[in-house]
Image (cartoon, rainbow, N blue to C red):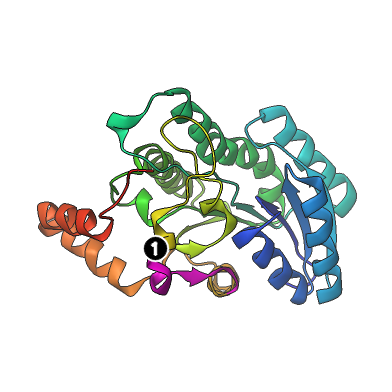
Amino acid sequence: MRGKTVVITGASSGIGEELAVALAARGAHVVLAARDEAALARVKQRCEQAGGRALVVPTDVSDPEACRRMVERSVAELGGIDALVNNAGMAMRGRFEDVTDLSIFERLMRVNYLGAVYCTHHALPHLKARRGLVVAISSLTGKSGVPGRTGYAATKHAMQGFFDSLRIELLGQGVDVLVVSPGFVATPIRARAVGPDGRTGHEDIAEEQGRRMMDAPTCADLILRAMERREREVVMIPAAKLMLALKALVPGVVDRIASRMIKQVRP
């Protein structure tokens, strides 16, 4: 990754922050995109201390024009784009029957799914020019439904379908597509989860299952390794790979397992 320019959305904390620092330590130039400019300045300092160059571009990925401006500035200041990591996202917790604010679903879709579409659309010509890499940070909920995560799972299913289709379209054009499906990762996104009333601050149920959670630096290292290898897809949890195999054979059993895994989904 030395000398490569990598754009990372959602770079102000969690997986995005740790991936940016890991890339900087490899000598990459990183573009840090998120809404929180103060947090991005802190991440920029960490990246530079790690030995890389970092450019802060405050960006709301739900705004297509903001995504266009972010890509244009990245190219103008760093000369091009070698990889785009679509990591920005927001979480939801709550049963669908308890939802009182249906606008939650549009908000989730605009950030988690459309934000990735907007950024990828504007970055794609530059990625083609450098035979680059598109990375989508999805989730296991993009492969199998999870109770209490209807809105979130829908956005990740949309991401999975979009990037799987894009990968096929780009065959032979030099641009690879990597879809990453982590499980529970210890990041601030849990504390900012949206509840059925549309308000944030609904802690994710994973909080109660701390031993099953991966830390953000470990997750970032696995993503970086997959990027360097230009892999097609990464499912990080071995048990999840088994569950996905079972889903094709006995989907009802997987539904019951998922239900037992998350026994408490009401905020």
Percent position of residue 260, x then y: 20, 58
Outermost residue, right side: 77
Above or below residue 8? Residue 3 is: below
In this view of the protein, which residue sits in the foreground, 148 or 245?
Answer: 148
- What secondary structure is marked by label 1? helix
Percent position of residue 167, x then y: 47, 50
Which residue is depicted at the point 75% across and 45% down?
Answer: 36
Q: Which span of residues is magenta-colored?
A: 208-217
In this view of the protein, which residue sits in the foreground, 158 or 4?
Answer: 158
Q: Is residue 120 visible?
A: yes
Percent position of residue 2, x then y: 77, 73
Indicate whether residue 212 is drawn in magenta. yes
Left or right position of 116 against 195 = right
Left or right position of 162 against 255 = right
Picture quadrant of residue 223: bottom right
Counting every numbered tag in the picture gives: 1
Percent position of residue 26, x then y: 74, 76
In this view of the protein, which residue sits in the foreground, 1 or 184?
Answer: 184
Indicate whether residue 120 is drawn in magenta. no
Above or below residue 232? Residue 49 is: below
Left or right position of 91 against 99 = right
Above or below residue 75? Residue 13 is: below
Q: Is residue 183 visible?
A: no
Q: Amino acid at mark 1?
A: Glu
Which residue is depicted at the point 45% across and 37% down?
Answer: 195
Q: Quadrant of the C terminus?
A: top left
Residue at which label 1 appears: 208
